[in-house]
Amino acid sequence: MPLIAAVGAQWGDEGKGKIVDLLAEKASLVARFSGGSNAGHTVCNPYGEFRLHLIPSGIFYPHTVCVIGNGVVVSPPVILEELEQLRGKGVDTSRLFISNRAHLIMPYHTLLDKLEEEAKGKEAIGTTRSGVGPAYMDKAARLGIRVGALLDKDELLHGLRIALQQKNALLTKLYGVSPLSLEEVYDECCRYAEGLASFIRETGPMVKEALARGELVLLEGAQGTLLDIDFGTYPYVTSSSPGAAGAFVGLGLSPSETKLDCNIGVLKAYTTRVGGGPMPTELSDRNGELIREKGREFGATTGRPRRCGWFDSVAACYSADLNAFSSIALTRL
C-alpha cells in the first residue's frame, strides 16, 4: 500500500497524530497537506512528549522524510520553535522539507485575526487567532507571500510593500491601531529566512518520486472533515480542505495517476469541538465535564477547554460518505 491518508472525521482533535506516529515507522515519507499552526498533534515517544503544530509526526523516525506541502500556511515563529524543541531533544530535523509554494503567515495576519475576532464580539467564530484565516484570504486574493520568497529578498520586499499598503489601511482606518513598519516586517522575515532556507524545496516531485519507487507515503491530515471550508458547518469552519480530497491539491498530486490505497478516518469514541458552531450531541452537564476531565480535553494550540459530547454517528456517517474511508481508527476508548 504505497499511499495512505489519515484524516480527521469529526471537528479535529481525534488523535490523528497518534495514528500517524504508529504508521510512520514504516513510511519513507510523511506529508502535511492543509491547515497551519491552528492544528496541534500531541506525540509521546522515547524522545519525550511533543505538541507539534506544523512538523509531521514522522520526524521522529530516522529513515522518514517529512514534507510540509503547498496547501499548508506556515508560521515561521512556530516552525522555528518546533525545530529548536526537536533539536534540543536530539531529533534529526534535516529530513524536513517545506514547499516553496506554501504561503507564509505574516505578523499582520496574526494581528488581524485577533482584531477581527474581538470586533465580532459574541458572533466570533472562535478561531485560534494564529493568523491562518487571514493568510488563506491573502492567498485567494493573490496578496499572499510564499515560502519561496524567503530565498529572494527582492521578491519578498516587493510582496511586503504591496501587502502592507492594504493591511496598514485596515489597521489604522478600520481598527484604529498603529500601522506596521515595512522595514521591521522585512527584517523579521530576513531572520526567518536564515533559519528556514535549508528546508525550502519544490516538494511536489519528492512525493511523486517516492510513490513511483513504490515506497510507503503517509498523508497526515490536520483538523477534521466537519471543519472543511466547503463541507463543514459553515461559517464555523477552518479556511482549508482537511478532507482526503484536499491532499491531492495540497501536495500537487493528480487524482488520475495517484491512487489512495488506504484512506483512514480517525474518530474519537466521543465527540469534541473547540470554538463556536453547532454540535448536536454536546453535553453541557456534569457528563460533559467528566469527559473533558478524563480525556484531558484542552486544545493543543490554545489550551481552551473543548466542548464534549456523545459520539455522533450521523456526523460520522456524513464524513465517511464524503471521504469514502476504507477503514476507521477509533481512539479514546
Image (tube, rainbow, N blue to C red):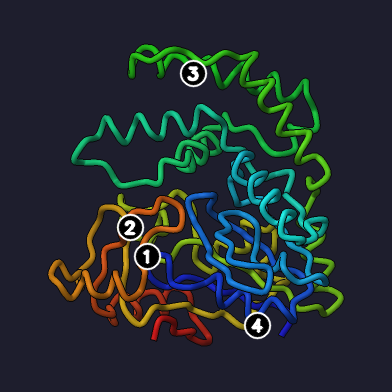
User: Of label 3 and label 2, which has the lower sequence position?
Assistant: 3
**Amino acid at dot 4:** Asp
Q: What residue did someone put label 4 on?
A: 261
Disc 2 to disc 1: CB gap under 8 Å: yes
Dot 3: within a 10 Å radius of its alpha carbon, few (fewer than 14), some, or many (20 or more) residues?
Answer: few
Residue placed at 34% from the left, 32% from the top? 116
User: Of label 4 and label 2, which has the lower sequence position?
Assistant: 4
State the residue lying farthest toward the right: 213
Q: What residue did someone put label 1 on?
A: 11
Above or below — where is 307 with respect to 203? below
Task: Give the secondary structure at mark 4.
Answer: loop
User: Of label 2 and label 1, which has the lower sequence position?
Assistant: 1
**Amino acid at dot 3:** Gln
Give the alpha-carbon distance from disc 4 to disc 2, as whole Å. Answer: 31 Å
User: Of label 3 and label 1, which has the lower sequence position?
Assistant: 1
User: Of label 3 and label 4, which has the lower sequence position?
Assistant: 3
Residue 164 drawn at (x, y percent) = 55, 18
220 or 19: nearer the eye? 19
Residue 188 drawn at (x, y percent) = 66, 25
Disc 3 to disc 2: CB gap under 8 Å: no
Q: What residue did someone put label 2 on?
A: 274
297 or 322: nearer the eye? 297
- Judge depth for marks 4 and 2 and give the one in front: 2
Task: Give the secondary structure at mark 1.
Answer: loop
**Amino acid at dot 1:** Trp
**In screen coordinates, is 323 left or right of 21?**
left
Give the alpha-carbon distance from disc 3 to disc 1, as whole Å. Answer: 33 Å
Give the alpha-carbon distance from disc 2 to disc 1, as whole Å. Answer: 8 Å
